[in-house]
Image: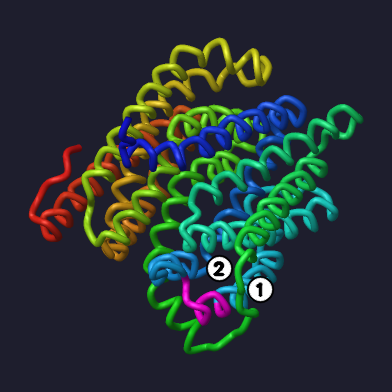
C-alpha cells in the first residue's frame, strides 16, 4: 500500500504533539488541584513571562537559522546562534523577576523569585535548542523532547505531592527541571555530528537578526495575544481568578495542539519547496478536521471533566472553556496560515498583522475584563481570534496566487 506524504508528515509531528498535549494536561491537573487557584495563577504568570522573554530576547535568531538552512545550518550560523543564546539567557534571568513583580506577584518569596529567574533562563535555552533541531530537519524530535520534558515535570511534581511538598516553589523547580531535560535531549541529538563552538561575531549576529527580527513581531505578538488575557486577569482580578481562567484556557488550547505542531511542518515544507504543495494542503485540512473533532469532544466533556479533574473550585471554568474551544478553532487556522506565509518569505506580512492585533487586544482585554470579568476575557479572545484568522487566510491566498497562480482550498 502506497503511503500518502501528507499523512506521513502529519503523523510525524502530530503524534509527539498529542503526547505533549496529554502530558501538559496531566501536569495542569496536578498543579491546579494542589496549588489552588491562587497558586495556579501565580505559576501561570511566571511561565508566561518566561515564554515571552524567550521570544523577545532571541530576536528571531531561531527563525533565521531555519530559513538559512540549505539543507542544514551553516557552521557560522550555528556558532553565532550559540554565542548569542548565552547572552540572551543571562538577560532573561535578570528581567523575569522584575516583570513578575510588576504584574502583581509581590507576595511570593525571595526563593520563588530566584526560581523565576532560573525558569526564564531555561525556557529560553530550551526554545533555542528546539529551533536548532528544527533547522536540522528534526521537527518531530523537537516536539518529542518537549513532551519528555513535560513528563519529567509531571513525575517530579507527583513526587512533591506524595511527600507533602506541593507548593509554588516545588512547581517552579519542576518547570526548571523539565526545560533542562528538554535542552539536554536536544543538545544530545544535535551533537551527534561535528558542531562549531559558540562565538560572537557581530556581523554574523546582525545577519541573523536582520532576517529573523520580523518574526519577533509575529512570535511575541502572537504569544501576547494568547497570554495577555491571563496577565490582565491576574492584574485586575487577582491570581485566584487567573487560576480559574487558566484551567479553561488550557483545556481549550489543547484542542489545537495538532494544528500548532503541523504549522511547524508546513513552514519547513513550504520554505523548502518555495511554494505551497498539494501535500501541505492535505496536511492543513487534516489538522483542521482533527482540531474540530477535539473541540466537539471537549465541549461535551467539559461539564464533567473540569470538576472531576480540577475540583469544585474550578467549576466556573466550564462555560469559559466551552466558548474558548470555539475560539481556538480560529486560532488553529490562523497559526497554520501564518506558517504558510512565513515559508513563502512573507514574514513581515505576518508580523504586521499580528502586531496590529496586539494594538487592538490590549484595550479590548482591559475594557472587557474590567466590565465583565472572566466572561469579558472570553469575548475579547473570540473576537480577536476570528479577525486574526480571517486576515491571515486572505493574505495566504494572495501570496499563493502570486507564487504559483493557484488558490489553496480552505
Residue 217 in which image quadrant: bottom left
Task: In the rendered structure, find residue 86 and report the number of the disc placed on it.
Answer: 1
Q: Residue furthest left?
A: 405
Rendered-image quadrant of the C terminus: top left
Question: Image height check: is 367 above or below 88?
Answer: above
Residue found at x 43% / y 28% = 324
Task: In the rendered structure, find residue 57 and report the number of the disc placed on it.
Answer: 2
Task: Residue 350: say if magenta.
Answer: no
Residue 57 in which image quadrant: bottom right
Residue 373 visible? The answer is: no
Residue 174 visible? The answer is: yes
Neighbours of disc 2 within 10 Å: few (<14), some (14-19), many (20+)? some
Neighbours of disc 1 within 10 Å: few (<14), some (14-19), many (20+)? some
108 or 388: nearer the viewer: 388
Q: Which residues are magenta?
A: 73-80
Q: Residue 302: percent from the left, percent from the top? A: 51, 16
Q: Residue 336: percent from the left, percent from the top? A: 33, 45
37 or 163: nearer the viewer: 163
Task: Residue 78: say if magenta.
Answer: yes
Residue 119 in which image quadrant: bottom right
Rendered-image quadrant of the N terminus: top left
Residue found at x 24% / y 42% = 281
Amino acid at each position: 500500500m502506497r503511503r500518502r506524504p501528507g499523512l506521513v508528515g502529519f503523523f510525524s509531528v502530530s503524534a509527539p504533539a498529542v503526547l505533549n498535549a496529554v502530558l501538559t494536561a496531566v501536569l495542569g491537573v496536578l498543579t491546579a488541584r494542589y496549588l489552588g487557584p491562587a497558586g495556579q495563577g501565580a505559576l501561570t504568570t511566571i511561565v508566561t513571562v518566561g515564554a515571552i522573554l524567550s521570544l523577545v530576547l532571541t530576536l528571531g535568531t531561531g527563525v533565521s537559522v531555519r530559513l538559512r538552512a540549505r539543507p542544514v545550518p551553516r557552521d557560522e550560523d550555528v556558532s553565532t546562534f550559540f554565542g548569542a543564546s548565552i547572552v540572551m539567557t543571562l538577560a532573561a534571568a535578570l528581567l523575569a523577576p522584575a516583570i513578575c513583580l510588576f504584574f502583581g506577584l509581590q507576595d511570593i518569596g525571595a526563593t520563588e523569585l530566584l526560581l523565576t529567574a532560573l525558569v526564564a533562563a531555561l525556557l529560553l535555552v530550551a526554545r533555542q535548542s528546539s529551533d536548532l533541531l528544527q533547522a536540522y530537519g528534526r521537527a518531530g524530535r523537537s516536539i518529542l523532547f518537549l513532551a519528555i520534558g513535560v513528563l519529567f515535570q509531571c513525575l517530579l511534581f507527583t513526587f512533591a505531592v506524595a511527600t507533602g511538598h506541593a507548593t509554588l516553589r516545588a512547581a517552579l523547580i519542576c518547570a526548571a527541571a523539565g526545560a533542562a531535560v528538554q535542552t539536554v535531549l536536544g543538545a544530545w541529538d544535535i551533537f551527534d555530528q561535528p558542531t562549531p563552538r559558540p562565538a560572537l561575531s557581530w556581523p554574523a549576529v546582525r545577519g541573523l537578526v536582520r532576517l529573523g527580527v520580523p518574526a519577533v513581531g509575529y512570535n511575541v505578538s502572537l504569544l501576547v495575544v494568547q497570554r495577555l488575557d491571563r496577565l490582565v486577569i491576574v492584574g485586575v482580578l487577582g491570581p485566584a481568578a487567573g487560576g480559574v481562567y487558566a484551567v479553561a484556557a488550557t483545556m481549550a488550547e489543547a484542542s489545537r495542539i495538532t494544528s500548532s505542531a503541523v504549522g511547524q511542518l508546513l513552514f519547513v515544507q513550504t520554505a523548502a519547496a518555495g511554494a505551497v504543495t498539494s501535500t501541505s494542503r492535505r496536511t492543513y485540512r487534516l489538522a483542521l478536521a482533527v482540531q474540530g473533532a477535539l473541540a466537539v469532544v471537549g465541549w461535551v466533556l467539559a461539564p464533567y471533566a473540569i470538576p472531576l479533574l480540577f475540583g469544585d473550585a474550578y467549576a466556573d471554568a466550564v462555560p469559559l472553556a466551552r466558548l474558548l474551544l470555539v475560539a481556538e478553532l480560529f486560532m488553529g487556522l490562523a497559526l497554520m496560515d501564518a506558517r504558510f506565509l512565513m515559508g513563502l518569505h512573507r514574514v513581515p506580512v505576518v508580523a504586521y498583522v499580528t502586531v496590529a492585533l496586539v494594538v487592538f487586544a490590549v484595550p479590548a482585554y482591559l475594557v472587557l475584563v474590567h466590565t465583565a470579568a472572566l466572561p469579558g476575557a472570553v469575548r475579547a479572545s473570540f473576537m480577536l481570534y476570528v479577525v486574526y484568522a480571517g486576515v491571515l487566510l486572505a493574505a495566504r491566498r494572495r501570496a499563493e496566487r502570486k507564487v504559483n497562480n493557484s488558490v489553496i482550498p480552505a
